[in-house]
Structures are given as C-alpha cells and as structure tokens.
Image (cartoon, helix red, strand yellow):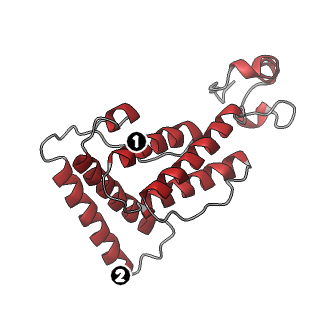
Amino acid sequence: MTQMTELAAGRLTPARAAEWVRVIELKCDWGALRVGSCYSVPHLRSLRRAFDAYNAALSTYTIDDRNEAMPDLSPNVPNRLRSWCRTVRAVLHRCDDGDCPARIIEKARKSADQIAITFRASAGKWVPAADRLAAIRQLDVVIAWCDERMTVSPIPAFEMGRQPAVRCGMSPVRTAAFHTYGQHFEGWVENPAG
C-alpha cells in the first residue's frame, strides 16, 4: 500500500475523505487496545473485534483500488509525525461531517508524548477536541510542536566528551577519529573487532 501524502489528501472527495477517516479511526482504536493490555480472554476478544472492524473498513475502502494510499501509521519521530498530522489535517479539511476523530487526535498526542520523552522535552498540555474543526486545531498544535523539535539538533549517538565510543566496541584510534569528526559520522556503525 502506498503512503498518503498531503497533496494526495487534498484530491480526495468529501465522501472518500470521510471513509478514509473512518478507516484510520478504526486502526487507531485497534492500536490503542494493543498498547499496555493485560491480554485476558475478554480483552483479546475485544482486540479481535476491533481488528476485524478495521480490516473490514480497509477492505471496503480499497475495494476499487488495492494501491489506495494510506498514511504512515508509525509516526515515531518529529518529521514523520509532522507529515502524518499534515496529511490527516488535509483529509479532515476535505470531510463534510463535523464529527471529531477522537482516536486519531489521541494517536497524534500520544505519539508527541513518546517523542517528547526521547527528546527530554515537554509535549505540553493537550485540550480535548469536541468537533472536526477543533481536531484540526489540535493537529496544528502538534505540527507546530514537531516543527520546534525539528529545529533542535538531534541527540547524537555518542555525545562528545560524555560517553566514550569505546563502550560500543570502537578502537581507541577510531574513538579519537570519531571525537574529531563525530558530527560528520552520525550513522557510523563500527565493527566491534576494531
């Protein structure tokens, strides 16, 4: 399945956008049930019902075109969350009904909270959305929050002077080279044999 973009979302008809929101709401509902659960028999049954509802809605949505675009469903870093929120916002602008996609907004907030833990930052206070326009405003807040996180440089794998790279299997010569040129080697994976 291809990934939905903000541009593609702007081309959806209002009816198609409403169907899309329903599919993503069901996906988020199923995902919320999966997180931190006890997996008792009643819970597993409700989890199965949620998955079946999502799968049926997805099948109905993609019946005409199996390559119908859907959003990235794992927005776990600021740029992906920002893109996800912008896509969802574009779809919500295309919808006619005023219902609030509560599960989608909850997913955006929880994703921002998880990213905030990684960045050692505050995600801020979230206000519940009552309708579709309030949900769009909430997405705007999350997008702005992601923009702020993207302007902050990411925490490097080895902070210079704080955590020696030797702990990760780098030889002392490679460690010195890394500390000298570390900012240029963010994705450097060193052979433990050195």
Cα separation between marks 2 and 1:
39 Å
* Residue 72 visible to an observer of this rendering: no
Q: Secondary structure at mark 2?
A: helix
What label does residue 41 carry, if any?
A: 2
- Please name whichever residue, 143 or 30, is drawn nearer the observer in this view of the structure: 143
* Quarter of the image with the N terminus in it: top left
- Please provide percent x and percent y for residue 55: 24, 58
Picture quadrant where residue 33 is located: bottom left
Q: Residue at image x 62%, y 60%?
A: 126
- Please provide percent x and percent y for residue 181: 77, 17
What label does residue 122 carry, if any?
A: none
Q: Is residue 83 above or below residue 15?
A: above
* Residue 152 visible to an observer of this rendering: yes
Left or right of residue 61, residue 106 in this image = right
Q: Could you tell me the amino acid type at mark 1?
A: Ala
- Please provide percent x and percent y for residue 11: 29, 35
Residue of label 1: 90
Q: Residue at image x 33%, y 45%?
A: 94
- Please provide percent x and percent y for residue 157: 70, 34
Left or right of residue 77, residue 121 in this image = right
Name of the residue lying farthest toward the left: 64
Q: Is residue 77 above or below residue 45?
A: above
- Please name whichever residue, 174 or 21, is drawn nearer the observer in this view of the structure: 21
Number of callouts: 2
Q: Could you tell me the amino acid type at mark 2?
A: Val
Q: Secondary structure at mark 1?
A: helix
- Please name whichever residue, 39 or 88, is drawn nearer the observer in this view of the structure: 88
